[in-house]
Image (cartoon, helix red, strand yellow):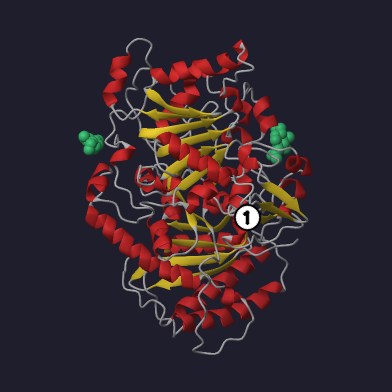
Amino acid sequence: MRSPWAHQSFFSSRRGLPLNGVLLCIVSVLLLIAIFRSPSSRSLDSAVSSPASEAYRSYRRLREEAASNFMEIRSLSLGMSRTGELDLCGKERENYVPCYNVSANQLSGFRNGEEFDRHCEVAGVGPRCLVRSPKDYKIPLRWPAGRDVIWSGNVKITNNQFLSSGSMTKRLMLLEENQIAFQSEDGTNIDGVKYYSRQIAEMIGLGSDAEFLQAGVSTVLDIGCGFGSFGAHLFSLNLMTICIAAYEIFGSPVQLALERGLPAMIGSFISRQLPYPSLSFDMVHCAQCGIIWDQKDGAFLIEVDRVLKPGGYFVLTSPTSKPQASSLNAKNRIMFTPIEEFTGKICWSLLAQQEETFVWQKTADVNCYASRKQGGIPLCKDENDETYYQPLLSCISGTTSNRWVPVQNRSHRPFDSQLSSDELAVHGVYPEDFLEDSRVWSSALKNYWSLLTPLIFSDHPKRPGDEDPLPPFNMIRNVMDMNAHYGGLNAAFLEARKSVWVMNVVPIRTSDTLPLILNRGFAGVLHDWCEPFPTYPRTYDMLHAMGLLSHLLDLKECDISSLFLEMDRILRPEGWVVLCDKVQVIEKARYLATQNRWEARVIELQNDNDQRLLVCQKPFLKK
Ligand SMILES: *[C@@H]1O[C@H](CO)[C@@H](O)[C@H](O)[C@H]1NC(C)=O
Ligand SMILES: *[C@@H]1O[C@H](CO)[C@@H](O)[C@H](O)[C@H]1NC(C)=O
């Protein structure tokens, strides 16, 4: 007996499907039928193709009906053993991040720091189990309270790390019982970050850091990023800061920043490029970020140059870069001089230096490079815009790109969902397509938002006609759009004033819209969904994917059940998954969701019989 969905790529389990699993599948089919056949289940407004949003007139009725059917079926199925559902992994995998196994990397011969890089090819296939939460895990506080206070049981950190005063941006951390408090930005005494940000603005020649946006600085790549406080401050000024840092088992800046609700991902460029296209960021920032910039013949500086937009800024704060009067010995100078020399070769000019902080500006003039024939770094030939963990370059990128537009030339409207037609033209996008996309997404978001209620699974009695309260605007914070296209979902969230930020993931081998997304002032990254995502477990509150599953199934290159395991890993307990795809694909997804023990329901879309929505919630499993 085979499951109705039996399909090679979904049943890689060596044991085959046990009988109980089959029963469970049948139960799920019954539920699907119950939903689709239900007489009152008039279909819903399409989240995809129909802009009109009278969406949920009949939705509530459908939902209640489905709920009662589901409860019945579920109580039947509860009697069975839970075979078919995946087990939790052991405690040792609580903080499991695939692709960063240093000892395995060393065994494979990676040296000179490369063992700390991402090496998915080395990792092999782990056990098929669900990453469990730590014993004292607690659901994070909502934004903005969660920005300043996190549960210490949620992050992997040692007590020693609090006591040792870290870099400037790490100093703001204090420990209270089971909470970690980051000094409020309003505090009058410890105000390092605010002061620092203003200092940088002044070094660029601005009156204050409130003028960053007017000066064309809206997206910042913060390398190392302490615990994200600089980014948190810039966020309050409507700048988007993405924190990247190398993988660390204890006290990872990335894990802490994400726990605070700040954009971050694991990223390092020891031997390979960052997963961003050239000309992506307006500013790159490193405060004591641990990189020795003059190593590898300047390859790290070339990588920074690659991701910087023309006219963009590189801010470096480092005690070793400061030529101190008392210790103006050879050592300190030699640490710094090669950087100064090198920045000349790549057409960066030193704007200012104050104390330990240096600000360089990348040239906005393509012709600058030609004038540096003597010892200058050559321009790259045959450039490929899709940069996915390629080896570091020794040449200058982006000079022939349409996107060579100085940051100072852009008209900046903070977090605006619209771009000017000139800007769209640079990305090869028609204004009509872009507008239509925005329209569709603001309507789709309204639908999604009303679906993010666990009512269907609760036994809380409902009276017909009850208006369900909508989820509060800050119910979720860290959102990942796994197939972001133009970043339309992100724009819709902002337009609807939900307090979220979105990691806009552009899958490789789709059209490369990441430069446009970053240009909108959003966070984004390239990613191959056949591989794990570079983040810690339990770091996202919601995952969204439209059309991603059918895209991956068409490619036939990876195992979708592994993707579902990965989604479970990065989703925090009680977090949401919203998938929109073709009917058959959603059926498969539903089965995999059940394996992951997610609560899942299928929603029909009006005007689109070929598409379904699957809304899932990850339960908070204690054992
Ligand atoms: C890391 O690699 C080592 C050596 O291959 C292996 O023994 C260990 O189980 C791996 N750790 C994880 C968490 O996968
Ligand atoms: C940027 O602006 C300057 C001054 O307005 C103009 O001369 C230049 O052509 C612009 N560059 C681009 C690439 O749009």
From the image, tell me which residue sits under label 1.
148
Q: Position of residue 8 (x, y in %)?
A: 53, 51
Relative side of 298 to 26, left or right: left
Quadrant of the frame with the C terminus = bottom right
Give the tally of numbered discs: 1
Relative side of 572 to 250, left or right: left
Q: Does residue 344 lie above or below 360 as drawn?
A: above
The residue that appears at 57% across and 27% down in the rendered structure is 291
Quadrant of the frame with the N terminus = bottom right
The residue that appears at 31% across and 39% down in the rendered structure is 408
Q: Quadrant of ligand 2?
A: top left
Q: Amino acid at mark 1?
A: Asp
The residue that appears at 42% across and 33% down in the rendered structure is 313
Q: From this viewpoint, is residue 511 visible? A: no
Q: Residues within 10 Å of mark 1 (few under 14, many from 20)?
A: some
SS label for mark 1? helix
Viewer-proximal residue among 118 and 491: 491
Q: Position of residue 354 (x, y in %)?
A: 51, 29
Viewer-proximal residue among 156 and 226: 226
